[in-house]
Image: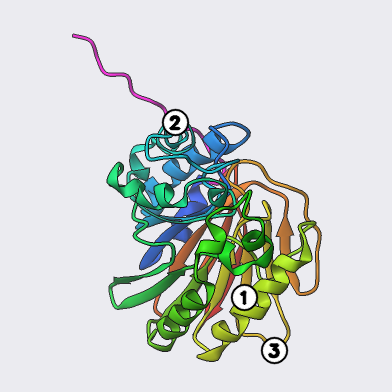
């Protein structure tokens, strides 16, 4: 009788520390990973699967640029296989994936990106922006998923490259965010979007200025947002601004990272590739930055 092949899990020196990442609610955050498995995408995907066996995440929050470079053309685009299905194939990643568009999705068919749930039961993107509450053992966390590309003028104006950006009603999204935060009474509120509000980057400053001008007044209005986390910059950053209760987090690329250096308010930065584990307990929120070797290289901690 032929015995089934048993795969030996990869050895990670940091594996014994993974237990510390578990909380009442545990979530994965990944972004900027769509490289057809190349660079570090496949190894990091395997790491995410291996770690999931220990930390038991409830879902994956996929915060844009799942598909470099021109988004997807349709629900049948082969990029769905080469960027997603064949890469995030570990049994412990057969979870709900809550996604939002990045700027690269806006180069293609954003409706097809949103509607992929018609093909994959993992894909939970029900609209361009939305909110999801996780509730377990008397701990609650509200995750607010934003569609940031239409909030930035340079994308809206470049209709030849980003045809769908100007079609979105930015003011309607901001009004929805205001109403959502007004009625958010969970233990923790975390807002996610693809683009940063604050970050070191060589990308055009107008992107951050537009985000600051449009989002900051709403995020500060009800004094209940703990963290704003994003991708787009392809490195890890943790920024705190004087007098601002919100921690600003940049999650690195899960495939190909870029150099970084400190900027105003930098607490930590790293050019490592990786992903983030979000851990919520009643009185403690942690965002743990994980490099491609599975090491916890920095933790953003919020206490009540």
Secondary structure at numbered mark 2? loop
Q: Nearer the viewer, residue 192 or 148?
A: 148
Q: How is the image coloured?
A: rainbow
Label 1 environment density (alpha carbons within 10 Å; few <14, some 14–19, many ≥20): some
Secondary structure at numbered mark 1? strand
In the rendered image, residue 191 lying in the magenta stretch gets the answer no
Label 3 environment density (alpha carbons within 10 Å; few <14, some 14–19, many ≥20): few
| Residue 168: x %, y % from top left | 50, 65
Asked if labels 1 and 3 touch by Cβ distance under 8 angstroms, the answer is: no
Q: Nearer the viewer, residue 110 or 97?
A: 110
- What's the residue at 58%, 41% (across, down)? 70
Q: CA distance from mark 3 to mark 1?
A: 11 Å
Residue 230, numbered label: none
- What's the residue at 62%, 78% (across, down)? 214
Secondary structure at numbered mark 3? loop
Pick whichever of labels 1 and 2 is earlier in the sequence: 2
Q: Is residue 30 left or right of residue 133?
A: right
Label 2 environment density (alpha carbons within 10 Å; few <14, some 14–19, many ≥20): few
Q: Is residue 303 above or below residue 298?
A: below
In the rendered image, residue 6 lying in the magenta stretch gets the answer yes
| Residue 204: x %, y % from top left | 77, 61
The residue that disc 1 covers is 247
Q: Examine the rendering and report whether any part of residue 282 can be seen.
A: yes
Asked if labels 3 and 2 touch by Cβ distance under 8 angstroms, the answer is: no
Asked if labels 2 and 1 touch by Cβ distance under 8 angstroms, the answer is: no
The residue that disc 2 covers is 78
The residue that disc 3 covers is 243
Pick whichever of labels 2 and 3 is earlier in the sequence: 2
Determine which quarter of the picture holds residue 158.
Answer: bottom right
Q: Is residue 38 above or below residue 201?
A: above
Q: Which residues are magenta?
A: 1-14
Q: Nearer the viewer, residue 233 or 267?
A: 233
């Amino acid at each position: 009788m032929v015995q089934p092949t048993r795969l030996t899990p990869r050895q990670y020196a940091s594996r014994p520390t993974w237990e510390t990442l578990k909380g009442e609610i545990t979530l994965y955050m990944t972004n900027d990973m769509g490289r057809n498995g190349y660079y570090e995408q496949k190894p990091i995907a395997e790491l995410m699967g291996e770690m999931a066996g220990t930390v038991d995440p409830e879902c994956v929050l996929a915060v844009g640029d799942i598909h470099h470079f021109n988004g997807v053309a349709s629900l049948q685009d082969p990029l769905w296989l080469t960027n997603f299905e064949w890469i995030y194939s570990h049994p412990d990643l057969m979870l709900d994936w809550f996604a939002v568009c990045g700027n690269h999705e806006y180069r293609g068919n954003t409706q097809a990106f949103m509607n992929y749930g018609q093909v994959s039961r993992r894909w939970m993107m029900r609209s361009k922006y939305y909110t999801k509450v996780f509730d377990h053992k008397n701990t609650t966390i509200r995750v607010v998923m934003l569609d940031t590309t239409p909030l930035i003028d340079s994308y809206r104006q470049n209709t030849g490259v980003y045809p769908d950006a100007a079609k979105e009603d930015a003011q309607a999204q901001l009004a929805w965010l205001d109403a959502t935060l007004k009625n958010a009474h969970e233990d923790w509120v975390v807002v996610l979007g693809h683009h940063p509000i604050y970050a070191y980057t060589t990308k055009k400053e107008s992107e951050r200025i537009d985000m600051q001008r449009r989002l900051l007044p709403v995020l500060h209005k009800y004094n209940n947002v703990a963290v704003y986390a994003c991708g787009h910059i392809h490195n890890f950053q943790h920024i705190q601004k004087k007098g601002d209760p919100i921690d600003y987090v940049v999650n690195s690329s899960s495939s190909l990272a870029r150099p970084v250096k400190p900027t105003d308010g930098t607490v930590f930065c790293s050019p490592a590739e990786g992903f983030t584990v979000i851990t919520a307990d009643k009185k403690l929120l942690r965002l743990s930055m994980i490099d491609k070797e599975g090491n916890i290289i920095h933790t953003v901690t919020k206490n009540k």
